[in-house]
Amino acid sequence: MNHLFFFYTLAVLLIGSALGIILARNPVYAVLSLVSTLFALSGLFVLLGAYFVAAIQVILYAGAILVLFLFVVMLLDLTPETLFKMKGGTLKLAGTLFGLFFLWQFAQAVRTFTPFPTSTTSSVAGTTAAVGKLLFTTYALPFEVASGLVVVGIIGAIVLAKKKVP
């Protein structure tokens, strides 16, 4: 009973803060909502028994990556007026596609929902060794692609923020 209470509490917090990211008018508030989203997600990892993944979630994402996000947001000086100058059609299309994708993922998750696994296939699941083995074998290419995207994003933010000297 206690686990279900924590699960549903964290799930509501996760969904609410994720909506806060989408609905925030100020980019800094969106990043701060992302912090609470990542903390709620790490709480769900703790409930699943993946303590290492939960710690990495807090240390790496909520710590280092969000500092980078805040730096880029402040570097770009994205005011709400600048954001609303974007074309409305693009935002509507993106919102529609996101909504359809969310509904599809939600329908699949409801069909296969089990809040807590009854047994684990391995006693080392969620440990440093298991995560490291997966990261450097199965998911090596996606890991490198993600790091390349972060570098490209940083370079793009610097290029966009650079003031042109007349």
Image (cartoon, grey):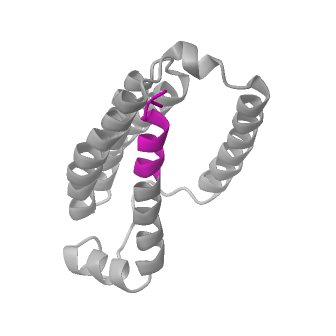
- Residue 97 appears at what percent x and percent y? 74, 42
- Residue 109 appears at what percent x and percent y? 60, 54
Q: How many numbered marks have been drawn onto this rendered protein structure? A: 0
Relative to 19, residue 126 above or below: below
Residue projecting furthest to the bottom: 137
Residue projecting furthest to the top: 81
Viewer-nearest residue: 130 or 110:
130
Q: Tell me if residue 85 can be seen.
A: yes
Please tell me whether residue 160 belongs to the stretch shown in magenta.
yes
Side of 40 where 101 appears, left or right? right
Q: Residue at x 51, y 17 (%)?
A: 25
What is the quadrant of residue 161 in the picture? Answer: top left
Side of 84 where 134 appears, left or right? left
Relative to 100, residue 56 above or below: below
Viewer-nearest residue: 157 or 138:
157
Is the stretch drawn in magenta largely helix, strand or loop? helix
- Residue 72 appears at what percent x and percent y? 37, 37
Q: Residue at x 52, y 15 (%)?
A: 80
Q: Tell me if residue 5 can be seen.
A: no
Q: Residue at x 24, y 58 (%)?
A: 56
- Residue 14 appears at what percent x and percent y? 42, 36
Please tell me whether residue 163 belongs to the stretch shown in magenta.
yes
Q: Which residues are magenta?
A: 153-166
